[in-house]
Image: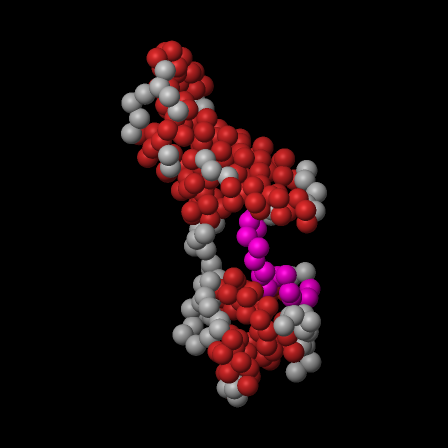
Amino acid sequence: MDQKKLYGRWNFWEELAGYPMMIYYWIRGERIKKLLYKRIEKARFRANQIILTEKIKHEFIIDYEKTDNFFSHHFKNIDDSRNHNFQEKIAYCLQQYRKESSRLMSSSNMMKLQENFLSGAETTLFIYFALDHKVKREIHLSDIMIGENSSVLLFDFLKAKKYIDENHNLLVDQKSSLIRIHRFLKDNYIINPDFQDITIIEAMENEYNTNFDKGTFSRAVIAKTSDFEESIYKELSKIFNIKY
């Protein structure tokens, strides 16, 4: 990140003012993690007051993409990872803050870094929470499956069968079997049949962090199912109350 944008000009009087403020925080024991979590809760509370219309949602998405501060720089990078939960992402940002602060010899710059980090976190996470953690225009299986807990039941089943890991990353070498499972759910109205295959492909790609091209999807749908897959369908039928 641009150091001039982060710290601005160095002024002697800011240096003098910086030390008492640093000592104040040390005496009170207000460590950066504690201060950060106060800002996180404040951002979460503010976000909960927002009625997210489509207009506001699109404006927030633009604002989020344009947000540029020390916290957002690191948070948006780690947020692209499917292997980290929210707490781990916050821990990563704290780690980056500590790395940056350990290089500073100026008290005024330390105070600027702290304020930039905390205010940036509140600004960034307010939008993040308001968008319900969805800061990209992506469709997921929960958006196209019928039933409040259908996607949760499916993911639990796929994890138990070792199709995906805890972070929904694909474990199996063959994608065809997973594709046929989703087609089975569409044929039996668990996945809304009004959605076209291209939409299901997009949702699967976002959900399982891998590519499912149209050719593979088409070939998988017409292929003959194996005895193992038949047993899978029977188990899914019991879970989703499907006549099979």
Front-lying residue, 42 or 13: 13
Percent position of residue 173, x then y: 40, 74
Q: Which quarter of the rendered picture does the C terminus lie within?
A: bottom right
Can residue 124 be seen? yes
Quarter of the figure with the N terminus: top left
Q: Main secondary structure of the magenta part?
A: loop
Q: Nearer the viewer, residue 58 or 170?
A: 58
Magenta-colored stretch includes residue 143 = yes
The stretch of residues the image draws in magenta is 133-147
**Residue at position x 45%, y 55% from top?**
82
Q: Residue at x 59, y 60 (%)?
A: 139
Q: Is residue 94 magenta?
A: no
Where residue 216 sits in the image (x, y, percent)? Answer: 48, 78
Residue 177 seen from this side: no
Please state which of residues 174 and 76 is positioned toward the viewer in this rendering. Answer: 76
Residue 1 vertical position relative to residue 21 in the rendered view, above or below: below
Residue 215 rendering spot, x and y as whole percentages: 49, 79
Residue at the image point whose x is 69% and y is 71% from the top: 194
Q: Quadrant of residue 40?
A: top right
Residue at 54% x, 39% y: name it: 125
